[in-house]
Image (tube, grey):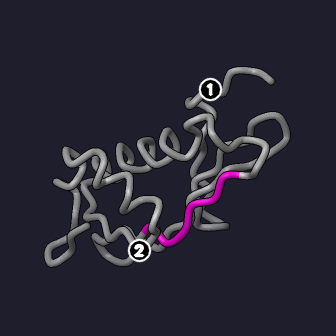
Amino acid sequence: MTTPDPFQIRKNNDRRRFEWTINGHTAFSEFILAGDRFFVTHTEVPRPLEGRGIGSLLIQHVLEWIEQANLRLVPLCPFTAAYLQRHPEWQRLLAEGYSV
């Protein structure tokens, strides 16, 4: 397996998700954008890519994008919420009234 390149993560607006294809397998994080709120609804890493930190790198990329876009995060995805608990510095992006 090749080393994954986080610069290959792309935002697919048609499918409303961030995608990262590695060795023919696509990890993704789905979202809904409503006004200034960015809802992360689901994150999935295919079994052959599990245990390599792919999901964490993907979510980190999504959070960086949210911050650059000046949006507020609503983490409906359990994986994203768990990531925010492990990395409280990203909780600054949470929309008002939301916590993890």
Residue 5, numbered label: 1
Within 10 angstroms of label 2, few (less than 14), some, or many (20 or more) residues? Answer: some
Total count of labels: 2
- Res. 61 image quadrant: top left
- Residue 9's spot in the image, x, y percent? 59, 40
Q: Which corner quadrant holds the C terminus?
A: bottom left
Write the start and end of the magenta stretch as one range.
40-45
- Does residue 45 appear to the left or right of 1 in the view shown? left
Residue 94 included in the magenta stretch of the image: no
> Is label 2 in a helix, a strand or a loop?
loop
Query: Which residue occupies the extreme right position in the image?
Result: 24
Overall secondary structure of the magenta stretch?
A: strand
The answer to whether residue 36 is above or below residue 52 is: below
- Res. 22 image quadrant: top right
Closest to the observer: 95 or 14? 95
Closest to the observer: 29 or 55? 55
Residue at image location 24% in from the left, 48% down from the top = 90
Type of amino acid at the residue the image marks with label 2: Leu
- Residue 6's spot in the image, x, y percent? 56, 31
- Does residue 56 appear to the left or right of 27 in the view shown? left
> Is label 1 in a helix, a strand or a loop?
loop
Measure how far apart labels 1 and 2 are at the Cα level: 26 Å
Residue at image location 31% in from the left, 72% down from the top = 37
Nearest to N terminus: mark 1 or mark 2: 1
Residue holding disc 2: 76
Type of amino acid at the residue the image marks with label 1: Asp
Query: Which residue occupies the extreme front position in the image?
Result: 51
The answer to whether residue 98 is above or below residue 71 is: below
- Residue 25's spot in the image, x, y percent? 80, 45
Residue at image location 42% in from the left, 59% down from the top = 80
The answer to whether residue 54 is above or below residue 12 is: above
Residue at image location 28% in from the left, 45% down from the top = 87
